[in-house]
Amino acid sequence: MSFCEGCIDLKELPGKEQGSTQQINGVTTYVSKGSRKGNVVVATDIYGLGIPNPKIVADIIANESGLNVYIPDIFPNGPIKPDDFQLPNKASSGPPSEERMGKNFENFMAWMGKGHGPDKTYPIFKKVIDEVSKEGPTGAIGYCYGAKLAVIAAQEGAVKGIALYHPSLLEASDAEKIQTKTLLNEAELDPLFGELKDTFEKTLKSRNLLDSRTKQYPNTVHGFGCRPDLEDAKVKAGWEESVSTTGKFFQETLA
């Protein structure tokens, strides 16, 4: 199952976007320019560009690493919206009831059926990778749903390296096909990747593709990469470290 409470627990990040929206190879894309050669293309979670968080994270990575960061709008029929789900306002309020989660799951599956499967979204993602790669070495970040797209790109050799945050939609065999260096930013509580974590790490390490900075961040949950609970000191520290580590990973990988 590729759905969990963490996928729809929205926590908007503070700040305002600093980049711009452009058309790249026919794809609407958020662009945060850096100061050096090299590109990172981001595959978002199910909220896509419907929330500011991915843009703010992109700006941070661009500012800290100097790399150009691109976020294509991979959901042609629109990302999932917070209003599509009935959720508590704060994580401390507790999880939604089973009945409410059932409705959320129903909404999610209906959305997936509207042209939002990876077979439909990856070609959009790849168009931006292909275009920006003409200007320099390119890597990819995948959050939750987007990790599947980043992995496909790594399997095809379309990118030089990938960083994955709490992946979903993956299978153990996917690790065997990856061709690039891989950084795993793992959540402590992750019902979607938890059972695959050890297999992915072992397989990638045996092939010398697992970055040594791969880490499970304390007290984090699935979704923390783009939607961290900054009121929790451990989560805030872990999220900030993961963003910094991701930038350094790509500085080295794309050098």
Image: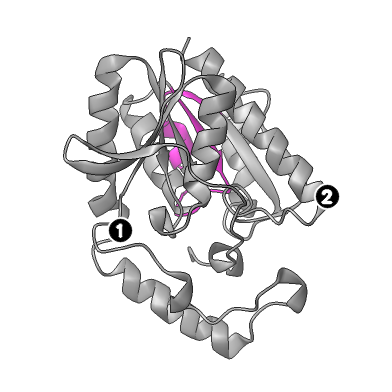
Q: Marks 2 and 1: which is nearer the front?
A: 2
For the residues marked 2 and 1, what is the alpha-carbon distance in whole angstroms? 35 Å
Q: Which residues are magenta?
A: 161-182
Residue under the point 65% across and 79% down? 88
* Residue at the limit of the structure toward the bottom, as seen here: 99
* Residue at the limit of the structure toward the right, as seen here: 233
| Residue 46 rendering spot, x and y as whole percentages | 43, 59
The reply, left or right, for residue 100 in relation to residue 29 is right
Task: Name the residue tied to disc 2.
Answer: 233
Vertical placement of 182 versus 135: above or below? below
The reply, left or right, for residue 185 in relation to residue 255 is right
| Residue 52 rendering spot, x and y as whole percentages | 49, 53
The disc placed on residue 117 is: 1
Q: Earlier in the sequence, mark 2 or mark 1?
A: 1
Which quadrant would residue 48 be assigned to in this image? bottom left
Question: Would you call the spot at circle 1 few (<14 residues within 10 Å), some (14-19), or many (20 or more)?
Answer: few
| Residue 242 rendering spot, x and y as whole percentages | 66, 36
Give the amino acid type for the residue marked by disc 1 in the picture.
Gly
The disc placed on residue 16 is: none
Question: Would you call the spot at circle 2 few (<14 residues within 10 Å), some (14-19), or many (20 or more)?
Answer: few
Vertical placement of 37 versus 47: above or below? above
Residue under the point 80% across and 55% down? 232
